[in-house]
Image (cartoon, rainbow, N blue to C red):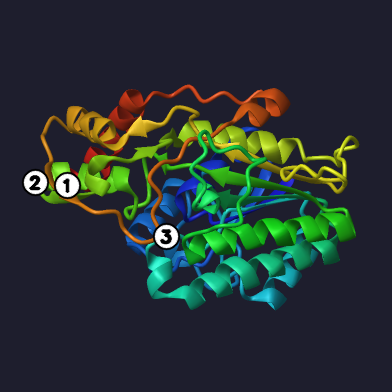
Amino acid sequence: MKVLVTGTAGFIGHFTALRLIDMGHEVVGLDSINDYYDINLKYGRLREAGFDVAEIKRQRLIRSKKHPKYQFCQAKLEEGDYLKSLFESENFDAVCNLAAQAGVRHSLEKPQAYVESNIVGFVNILEACRDSGVKNLSYASSSSVYGLNESMPFCTSDSVNHPVSLYAASKKSNELLAHTYAHLFGISCTGLRFFTVYGPWGRPDMAPYIFTKAAFNEETIKVFNHGKMKRDFTYIDDIVDGVVRVIENPCKADKSWDPQSPTASTSSAPYKIYNIGNNEPVELLDFINAVESAVGKKIRKEYTPMQPGDVVATYADVSDMITCLGYKPSTSVKDGMVKTVEWYRSFYNV
């Protein structure tokens, strides 16, 4: 297939594109390379994929020096006219939309960025699929959509009508928009609710990276809710395994779907929602211990109350992905953090 993967200067997008290339697919990557976090890390991922970053110019495709079937372009999802022309010229078989304005806490400060990228940008993706005849769309949602729900584990049949951050609300909006386009235009739309993803090349605004950096630099970390939190930490290789399975197996309409008793995660349209996580939540302090073990240093801790927009726990029920796609995460937190710290040492020369 020829696949458009958005967000390929980002964490999950970078590894998804490389896995697709390794599997023999052709990939066009797209990313705005915004400055939400250190762009040197984003350029580093692109270099790792074989791109000469000096060649990057807005709205122009360049080709990887390592992977002849991999092209990249810097552009924003909000640039609807350019997206339309890209779809027309490249004739994609599938689209995997992993680009978004990320971050729960940041959405409290700059809400407009989330509306523009995550809602307007996603509509542009849907419209481009509609106009060009692309029928296979997968996209990133988030575990944050579960919001105030405290029923564990989180199941895709649960209500997600009580988000606690604008970021979560924007992801819930993506799911609603995707269903509408699946129903009206027959586009196969599969949403992936990601649970805390970590690994080499990970995002510096996420806890695993923050903890690792603090351990090496002997900095103090804030441990929110006094450490009484759980996260379904999921290693990047396990996440990418699930993403590519979804890309290669577009969802179909659920013939048994009952409008008198509607199931939230499927539909009479070609629409599906999956949780994608490790299915084994870890206490925050246990995860910090795994970081300390991998680094070989203790981390100074400041215990603080819960932050606005955060949730106490995340725990993914991934039974649908196991049953439908054979997905099974296999990387322990201990092993995952050893690999993460090895990358960190190498990248930052520490």
38 horizontally vs 59: left or right: left
Residue at image position (61%, 74%) is 78
Image height of 171 relative to 266, above or below = below
Quarter of image, res 23: top right
Q: CA distance from mark 3 to mark 1?
A: 21 Å
N-terminal of the pair, mark 3 or mark 1, is 3
Residue at image position (82%, 42%) is 261
Q: Secondary structure at mark 1?
A: helix
273 horizontally vs 199: left or right: right
N-terminal of the pair, mark 2 or mark 3, is 3
For the residue pair 132 and 261, the one nearer the viewer reads as 261
- Depth-wise, is mark 3 or mark 1 nearer the camera? 3
Q: Which residue is mark 1?
A: 214
Q: Residues within 10 Å of mark 3 (few under 14, many from 20)?
A: some
Image height of 291 relative to 179, above or below = above
29 horizontally vs 207: left or right: right
Verify CB contact (< 8 Å) between mark 1 and mark 2: yes
Q: Which mark is residue 104?
A: 3
Q: Position of residue 165 (x, y in %)?
A: 47, 63
Q: Which mark is residue 218?
A: 2
Residue type (three-letter) at the residue carrying disc 3: Val
Q: Position of residue 38 (x, y in %)?
A: 32, 62
**In which quadrant is the N terminus drawn?**
top right
